[in-house]
Image (cartoon, coloured by chain):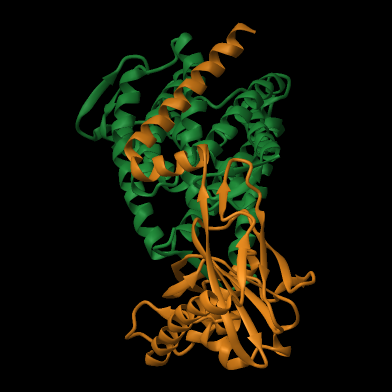
């Protein structure tokens, strides 16, 4: 069954979109990741214009993060104060990101920048995950490395703030900067940014792992909501019909994924996800460097 | 430029003359099965059915032209191994859609001069750079890139569709309108060519518009983009909450 997407201005197969949403939702359920960094490139591969894919995916992430944060909220795993500081940075970063997005779109370089960002981040993250999972598979018997608090230059920064839930007393500048950076990624790449924020919160800020996911989800809700709103206003690229189809598939897929995920071993999971990420990255890289079918392309003029 | 202006003037004059002629001698009469194409949720393209009568002898060519638009054409170059958009030209007067139908091969009856003046056939389409002062040396490459890309998108077709005479000089043709068609007013021009001369021409209009939910969504997104953004967020929040609630119980 075909459905016409009003903003993307193309007709796509409903079941294919539901399956895509379900598949990525399942992966995100299994691996406990947002899935935006897989969904957005897959939308490109389907022929959805990159600008529409990025903005619409931000909208879908609002839904999946709301659903996720509620579960963490009930367990009390959300540091609201930390979330608020990250959010302040996120709003700054994402607002700047959407502005940058409009400028790059005008220059005809947005596709390139989005895809290059994906190649860079997916390859770094894929490799890191692969190395770590291989390491832990080899030494799964050994205890986890102790995470002592190192005193570095970061602890000398001003504007210190106490984060009770995270049991931290650190400069507010650190989470603010992380927030700005993640917000920028959200706007340009159509991701929640959890894959950057979660490691940053654990390794840079030293937050306890238990509150990291819930807190990052809280920040992601508001940042992706901000991106959705600004993209709607500046670029009119949020396709609610597409977003709703992805939400339905994603929500159902994530529930099954979570059940499957609890049956598999952590390091195997990470290794598998690393391979998927690297596969998507390889395809994007190939598309950027292989000679295109046509060297010329049509951009949007005044007509659209 | 002045030649094309002159050509346009002649074309307009001939249209007026053509319709005037229709009044007296009623050379061609054309009608569309459906003058409005509605793009709805299930839209996957449609067939434009055209009927007409052309008394006397002569050949018919029908041209369907979408609303004219501006297009930006960009050319990629390799930079450090990656293909990057470098040169760009903004073009105007680019029809969003272009298709033809005729009862036999165009080169058998259509003189090049007429085809050129009336822009019949893709090779005769005239696009102009928006910045008149800038004339790229390889302007032709950019022009052909538009033709090529639009053909790949099924928006332009090079060869005419078949047009069938059914007796009593009654003719019929079917032109495919793909799902990715742009909205707007389409011109459907019918030319009657007799002995290498333009005997008559007729223009009728067709309206392609979004209809129903699709139209509302598109208009809403463009006219009240702030409210649209808020609504998109609200939908997402409700969907997320509903999902969480539904799966918690089970």
Q: Is residue A209 visible?
A: no
Percent from the top left, x then y, of residue B101? 68, 73
- The foreground one among A207 and A242 is A242
Q: In which quarter of the image is the C terminus of chain B?
A: top right
Question: Relative to A247, is B116 above or below?
Answer: below
Residue appearing at x 44%, y 47% in the figure: A237
The chain drawn green is chain what?
A: A
- The foreground one among B103 and B210 is B103
Residue appearing at x 34%, y 83% in the figure: B132
Question: Relative to A94, is B137 above or below?
Answer: below
Q: Chain B is drawn in which colour?
A: orange
Residue appearing at x 26%, y 30% in the figure: A172
Percent from the top left, x then y, of residue B181? 57, 58
Question: Relative to A79, is A123 above or below?
Answer: below
Percent from the top left, x then y, of residue A296? 54, 73
- The foreground one among B202 and A90 is B202
């Amino acid at each position: 069954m075909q459905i016409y997407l009003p903003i993307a201005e193309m007709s796509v197969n409903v079941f294919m979109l539901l399956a895509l949403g379900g598949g990525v939702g399942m992966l995100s359920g299994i691996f406990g990741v947002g899935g935006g960094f897989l969904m957005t490139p897959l939308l490109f591969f389907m022929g959805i214009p990159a600008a529409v894919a990025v903005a619409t995916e931000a909208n879908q992430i609002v839904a999946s993060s709301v659903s996720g944060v509620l579960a963490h909220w009930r367990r009390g795993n959300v540091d609201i104060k930390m979330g608020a500081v990250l959010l302040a940075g996120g709003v700054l970063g994402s607002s700047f990101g959407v502005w940058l997005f409009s400028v790059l779109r005008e220059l005809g370089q947005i596709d390139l920048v989005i895809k290059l960002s994906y190649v860079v981040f997916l390859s770094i993250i894929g490799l890191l995950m692969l190395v770590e999972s291989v390491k832990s598979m080899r030494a799964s018997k050994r205890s986890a490395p102790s995470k002592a608090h190192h005193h570095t230059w970061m602890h000398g920064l001003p504007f210190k703030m106490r984060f009770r839930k995270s049991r931290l007393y650190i400069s507010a500048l650190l989470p603010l900067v992380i927030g700005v950076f993640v917000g920028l990624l959200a706007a340009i790449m159509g991701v929640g940014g959890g894959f950057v924020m979660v490691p940053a919160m654990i390794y840079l800020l030293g937050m306890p792992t238990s509150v990291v996911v819930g807190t990052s989800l809280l920040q992601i809700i508001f940042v992706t909501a901000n991106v959705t709103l600004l993209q709607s206003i500046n670029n009119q690229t949020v396709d609610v019909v597409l977003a709703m189809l992805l939400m339905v598939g994603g929500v159902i897929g994530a529930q099954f994924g979570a059940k499957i995920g609890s049956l598999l071993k952590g390091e195997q999971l990470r290794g598998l996800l690393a391979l998927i990420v690297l596969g998507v990255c390889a395809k994007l890289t190939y598309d950027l460097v292989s000679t295109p079918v046509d060297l010329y392309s049509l951009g949007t003029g005044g007509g659209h | 430029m002045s030649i094309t202006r002159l050509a346009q003037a002649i074309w307009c004059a001939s249209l007026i003359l053509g319709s005037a002629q229709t009044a007296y001698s009623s050379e061609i009469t054309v009608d569309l099965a459906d003058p409005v194409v509605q793009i709805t949720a299930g839209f996957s393209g449609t067939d434009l059915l055209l009927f007409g009568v052309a008394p006397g002898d002569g050949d018919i060519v029908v041209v369907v032209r979408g609303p004219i638009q501006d297009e930006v054409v960009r050319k990629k170059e390799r930079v450090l191994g990656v293909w990057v958009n470098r040169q760009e030209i903004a073009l105007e007067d680019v029809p969003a859609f272009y298709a033809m139908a005729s009862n036999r091969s165009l080169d058998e009856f259509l003189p090049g001069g007429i085809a050129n003046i009336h822009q019949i056939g893709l090779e005769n389409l005239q696009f102009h750079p928006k910045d008149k002062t800038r004339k790229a040396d390889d302007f032709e490459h950019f022009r052909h890139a538009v033709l090529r890309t639009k053909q790949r998108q099924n928006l332009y077709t090079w060869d005419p569709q078949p047009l069938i005479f059914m007796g009593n000089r009654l003719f019929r043709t079917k032109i495919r309108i793909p799902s990715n068609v742009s909205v707007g007013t389409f011109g459907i021009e019918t030319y009657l060519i007799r002995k290498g001369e333009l005997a008559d021409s007729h223009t009728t209009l067709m309206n392609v518009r979004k209809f129903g939910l699709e139209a509302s969504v598109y208009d809403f997104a463009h006219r009240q983009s702030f409210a649209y953004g808020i609504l998109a967020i609200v939908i997402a929040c409700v969907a997320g909450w509903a999902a969480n609630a539904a799966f918690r119980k089970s």
